[in-house]
Image (tube, rainbow, N blue to C red):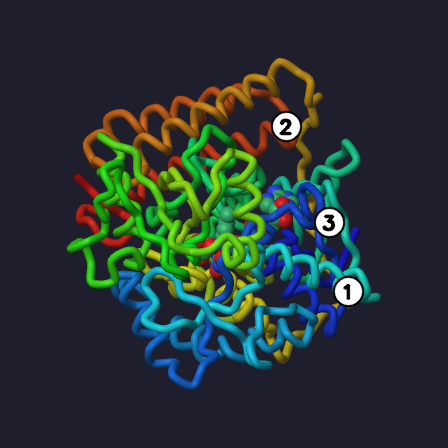
């Protein structure tokens, strides 16, 4: 099978790039579950952009750099922020109906922002964006979609990428492409406690590692401070915009946790709030308190969160909301330039799988959907697509049954990886234990997985999680001082 553009992943970056690429050639999107299965579909808070007269690019750039501990690539930050306004209006043109007031976009606030600059749709911004992009994709004659199709590995020869080997309809196939695009999202599922759905197993980063792409900043895992503290997987997020609308973080005895901790208090950057909650919860429960707001306001502003909390018998208007930090986002990834180019020819990457450098050591809230959107709006202008590809021979692994004992072993190893990552690459880290315990444990898991002959999606995901987990632990060990999300004790 052959196409002009092979896009792996159907979140905001994959779908948005598909709409751009379809103007130039034939596009095939493959995705490992259904189209809407993505982190994008879970996004609650909104998208940051300069959208108000009282705001400007300089301020958004400053906030992004400050949240990222100035570890960011300033050029990339400037590029993203200066393209932010146009990116939002592109979504509006596609049909996304952001909240409005008096005919203008209504904006909210999140941690680390000195201005109200988050455009949103209730508390389900990602779901709405995904819905509109899927609608536009399905209408496009140049775009084909394969759901339930798992990218196993990239087809690489020398420094060229020729497509991807995939598992589809219980077979391993090769899909060849002039340009292959990794839009595979993040790695939250590597951690025991996460806000990410089960698809976030780091497949794209693992494929990049195997293909010798350059990685950067993968030790910077962002933990969201306020996941609902209930025994559910994934953890349900209580959006930062709840604090943006005035909620406070309090301890059991009613003490305001963030008082005297940062000038922005409850809206301090995420790494700082997550650490304070983590430290406090070693001895007491931590809560969000938004009881000063009326039921009617909360129901309208946070319809999904209100309903979800109700199912746990928590009434936001009357009760405290128990919260805990959970793995949320990877700030680094495969190194790309402003056009999404990787080290390999004809291999591009967009979205959470990348390291464009915009997030530095800690991502500013709601800059992720923005990054995915702005960078996937780029397409090489002088792009030439040839009629025929020179296709290299590629070996196929044996596909084994998903009911086999080997698959059960792989599932068990996934659970072990999650525990290792939570313990050694969590909110507070220790280089000695990473070296003496974390790394040897993950290397043992890699050895166990190597003993399995053959593959299937479950086995491949476990291998990917182990490969990416090892790289994160190695990067965390290498970084000797605390900065942003990487906090050492
Ligand atoms: P994704 O949306 O994760 O899409 C990745 C796609 O790749 C999926 O379709 C997946 O199935 C597919 N895939 C992966 N591996 C394979 C494979 N091997 N083969 C085939 N397909 C594969 N960011 C914000 O800016 N604002 C927010 O308000 C916000 N809220 C969030 C709330 C939650 C609960 C979560 C989890 C994240 C939130 N984020 C938010 C982060 C943001 O949603 C993500 O960073 C962003 O959506 C990533 O988009 P993406 O296109 O890179 O990846
Ligand atoms: C949230 O709504 O709190 C998530 C925002 C983000 O991840 O940027």
User: What residue is pinned by disc 1?
Assistant: 26
Q: Is residue 253 above or below residue 265?
A: above
Q: Is mark 2 within 8 Å of ligand 1?
A: no
Q: Answer few, some or many: residues within 10 Å of disc 1's Cα (few below 14, many 20 plus, some between 14 and 19).
A: some
Say which of 475 and 391 sits in front: 475
- The local secondary structure at tag 1 comes to loop
- The mark lying in front, picked from 3 and 1, is 1
Task: Tell me the tag on residue 142.
Answer: none
Q: Is residue 195 left or right of residue 385?
A: left
Which residue is drawn at the image coordinates 45% and 62% (left, top)? 366
Q: Answer few, some or many: residues within 10 Å of disc 3's Cα (few below 14, many 20 plus, some between 14 and 19).
A: some
Say which of 243 and 331 sits in front: 243
Q: Earlier in the sequence, mark 2 or mark 1?
A: 1
**Labels 2 and 1 touching (C-beta < 8 A):** no
Q: Is mark 1 within 8 Å of ligand 1?
A: no
User: What residue is pinned by disc 2?
Assistant: 455
Q: Is residue 266 left or right of residue 312?
A: left
Q: Is residue 262 above or below residue 393?
A: below
- The local secondary structure at tag 3 comes to strand
CA separation, marks 2 and 1? Answer: 30 Å
Q: Position of residue 16 (x, y in %)?
A: 64, 65
Task: Tell me the tag on residue 175.
Answer: 3
Q: Position of residue 90 (x, y in %)?
A: 62, 76
């Amino acid at each position: 099978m052959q196409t002009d553009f092979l896009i792996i992943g159907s979140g905001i970056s994959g779908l948005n790039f598909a709409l751009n690429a379809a103007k130039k050639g034939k596009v095939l999107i493959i995705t490992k579950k259904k189209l809407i299965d993505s982190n994008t579909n879970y996004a609650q808070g909104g998208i940051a952009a300069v959208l108000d007269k009282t705001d400007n690019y300089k301020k958004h750039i400053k906030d992004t750099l400050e949240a990222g501990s100035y570890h960011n690539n300033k050029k990339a930050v400037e590029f993203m922020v200066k393209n932010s306004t146009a990116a939002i209006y592109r979504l509006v043109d596609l049909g996304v109906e952001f909240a409005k007031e008096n005919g203008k976009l209504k904006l909210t606030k999140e941690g680390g922002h000195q201005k109200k600059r988050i455009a949103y749709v209730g508390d389900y911004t990602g779901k709405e964006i995904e819905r509109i992009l899927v609608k536009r994709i399905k209408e496009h004659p140049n775009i084909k979609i394969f759901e339930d199709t798992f990218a196993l590995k990239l087809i690489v020869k020398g420094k060229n990428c020729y497509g991807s080997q995939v598992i589809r309809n219980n077979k391993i196939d090769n899909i060849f492409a002039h340009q292959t695009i990794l839009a595979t999202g993040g790695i939250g599922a590597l951690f025991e406690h996460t806000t990410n759905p089960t698809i976030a197993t780091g497949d794209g980063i693992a494929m990049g590692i195997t293909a010798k792409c350059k990685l950067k900043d993968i030790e910077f895992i962002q933990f969201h401070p306020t996941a609902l503290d209930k025994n559910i997987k994934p953890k349900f997020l209580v959006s930062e915009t709840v604090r943006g609308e005035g909620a406070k973080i309090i301890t059991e005895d009613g003490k305001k946790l963030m008082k005297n901790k940062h000038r922005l208090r409850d809206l301090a950057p995420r790494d700082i709030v997550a650490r304070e909650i983590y430290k406090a919860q070693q001895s007491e429960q931590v809560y969000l308190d938004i009881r000063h707001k009326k039921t009617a306001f909360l129901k309208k502003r946070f319809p999904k969160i209100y309903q979800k909390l109700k199912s746990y018998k928590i009434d936001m208007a009357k009760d405290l909301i128990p919260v805990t930090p959970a793995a949320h986002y990877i700030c680094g990834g495969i190194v790309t330039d402003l056009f999404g180019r990787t080290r390999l020819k004809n291999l591009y990457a967009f979205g959470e799988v990348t390291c464009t450098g915009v997030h530095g050591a800690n991502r500013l809230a709601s800059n992720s959907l923005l990054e995915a959107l702005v960078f996937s709006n780029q397409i090489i202008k002088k792009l030439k697509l040839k009629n025929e590809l020179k296709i290299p021979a590629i070996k196929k692994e044996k596909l084994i049954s998903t009911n086999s004992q080997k698959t059960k072993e792989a599932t068990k190893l996934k659970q072990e990886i999650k525990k290792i990552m939570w313990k050694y690459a969590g909110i507070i880290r220790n280089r000695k234990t990473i070296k003496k315990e974390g790394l040897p444990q993950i290397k043992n898991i890699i050895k166990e997985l190597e003993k399995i002959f053959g593959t299937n999606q479950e086995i491949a995901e476990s291998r990917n999680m182990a490969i990416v987990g090892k790289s994160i632990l190695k990067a965390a060990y290498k970084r000797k001082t605390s900065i942003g999300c990487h906090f050492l004790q």
